[in-house]
Amino acid sequence: RLDWAKKMGATVTINPKKENVQERITELTNGRGVDIAIDITGRYGGFDLATKMIKIGRGKILIPSYYGQPETVDLGTELMLKSPIIHSTHPAYSRDYLYDMVTGLWATAKGVFPIEDLITHRFKLNEINKAFEVLSTNPSGYIKGIVTMD
């Protein structure tokens, strides 16, 4: 995934298995924090980390993830001091869903958003159970999988 991020233009990548993400962000931003954090972990720990990495004073946290299991996290201090703006990026959040969908399709067709580079696994409809198994194990190199109606 880090290689994919570099391919897509990331100038800095952080491997959380090798580096302390919060310390590295503090270093990269000279202690200021990021303007926008995107939590795609699907775990409350990722959301907690996002609140710690954003700047003081209305940094944004985008959440395209679904948090499947309830957890307890301590966000009081971060919420009080930083006053983050938290956005769900679910389609229902859109003010003009049709416009956003058409824009997204146009960007994909023009290569602005390289959706094909995101798709690392393809499954036929009769392999849907296998698709869910692969998704749940999150193998190395897995970014997104699709099920086709072939």
Image: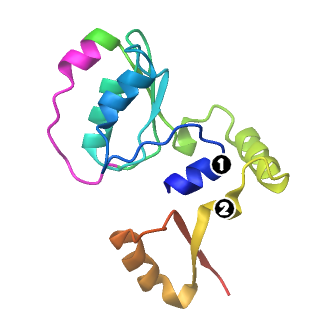
Residue depicted at 35% across the width and 70% down the height: 136
Write down the quadrant of residue 27 in the picture: top left
Confirm whether the magenta stretch covers residue 74: yes
Q: The C terminus appears in which quarter of the rendering?
A: bottom right
> Furthest-bottom residue in view?
126
Along the line of sight, the residue nearer the viewer: 95 or 134: 134
Q: Provide residue 113's location: percent of width, then percent of height.
A: 72, 49
* Residue 118 against residue 79 in the figure, above or below: below
Task: Point out which mark residue 61 bears.
Answer: none
* Amino acid on which disc 1 is placed: Met
Residue at (49% x, 42% y) in the render: 13
Q: Percent from the top left, x then y, of residue 116? A: 69, 64
x 60%, y 48%: residue? 6
> Which label number is shown at residue 8?
1
Q: Is residue 100 left or right of residue 77?
A: right
Q: How would you classify the magenta stretch by its main secondary structure?
A: loop
- Residue 51 image position (x, y, % from top left): 32, 26
Side (left or right) of 35 relative to 42:
right
> In which quadrant of the rendered view does residue 68 lie?
bottom left
Furthest-right residue in this view: 110
Say what secondary structure mark 1 lies in. Answer: loop
Residue identifier under label 2? 117
- Label located before the other in sequence (1 or 2): 1
Q: Are marks 1 and 2 in contact (CB under 8 Å)?
A: yes
Whether residue 33 appears in magenta in the rendering, the answer is no
Query: Start and end of the magenta stretch?
Result: 67-80
The amino acid pointed to by label 2 is Asp
Q: Position of residue 96 (x, y in %)?
A: 69, 35
Q: Nearer the viewer, residue 128 or 7?
A: 7
Q: Secondary structure at mark 2?
A: helix
> How did the renderer colour the structure?
rainbow
Observer-side mark, 1 or 2, equals 1
